[in-house]
Amino acid sequence: MNSSAAAIVPVGTAVLCLLLLIGKQAWCHPVDKPLSPALHDDDTFNDINDISKHAQSQMEDDGSVRLIPKVIHREHPNKENLEICCLHANILDFYLNNILLHRDDQHPNMPRLKTNLDRISRDLKAQGCNIAHYHNHRHASEFRSTFNQMGEKGVTKAVGEIDILFTYMQVFCIHSRKHVTTAAASSFSSSTAFSSSTDADAL
């Protein structure tokens, strides 16, 4: 990561991450301290990028089906960030235990990525994520249901969306030092459709 990327202010980070979430080729390194150092690790970042692009090149769909739920960020950064983070940590564990488990031959960097993602999962649990609590969350359930309905295509689709999952975890799995500004929150909300509240079961 170059020095200019590291110097991006919070608003710039939110907008840069937003570009990825609406389909642009952009990546983000949030300036807030991550709950897992692996979320800012360059090897993890590059492996996510390479492996997701490789899977996307193998997909034959029109993009109408999406596995990873979209997120609206509201202005409750401390509690809400952790809830959204832990929801996606639950989805990450599903990746580790069901999607990536036997996929080492899919990409030469897959073993290293799995090691780093496992580290992220362990770090988040150590930081207070009760990952099992989110197993029956409607978005986690919808993710698994859609994945299972797609069969083998679901595996490729999920690997192709691992960049989205990683970006959400970069954004929300943080020790937040500042509130997202009204402008950034408004921009983020206008492009997404996943609502969240302080009730973990109604994110």
Image: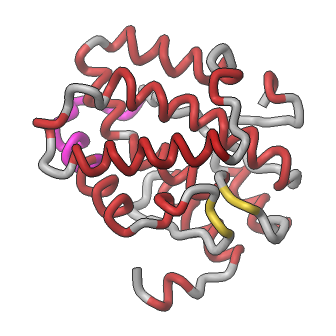
Q: Examine the structure image and report whether residue 63 is included in the region drawn in magenta.
A: yes
* Residue 129 drawn above or below residue 98: below
- Give residue 14's position: percent from left, percent from top: 65, 66
Residue positioned most to the front: 126
Compare residues 5 and 105 and report the one nearer the observer.
Answer: 105
Q: Which residue is depicted at the point 70% across and 74% down?
A: 11
Q: Examine the structure image and report whether residue 145 is included in the region drawn in magenta.
A: no
* Residue 105 drawn above or below residue 135: below
- Give residue 5's position: percent from left, percent from top: 50, 82
Compare residues 145 and 123 and report the one nearer the observer.
Answer: 123
The C terminus, quarter of image: top right
Tell me: 103 left or right of 4: left
Q: In the image, which residues are magenta?
A: 52-64
The N terminus, quarter of image: bottom left
Q: Which residue is depicted at the point 44% across and 52% down?
A: 23
Task: Answer with the quarter of the image where residue 126 lies.
Answer: top right
Q: Which residue is depicted at the point 22% across and 45% down?
A: 110
Tell me: 46 left or right of 129: left
Tell me: 90 left or right of 54: right
- Give residue 133's position: percent from left, percent from top: 71, 22
Main SS of the magenta part reads: loop
* Residue 8 drawn above or below residue 79: below
Image color mode: secondary structure
Tell me: 174 left or right of 157: right
- Give residue 42's position: percent from left, percent from top: 37, 69
Tell how many labels.
0
Task: Answer with the quarter of the image where residue 160 lies.
Answer: top left
Q: Which residue is depicted at the point 82% across and 55% down?
A: 77
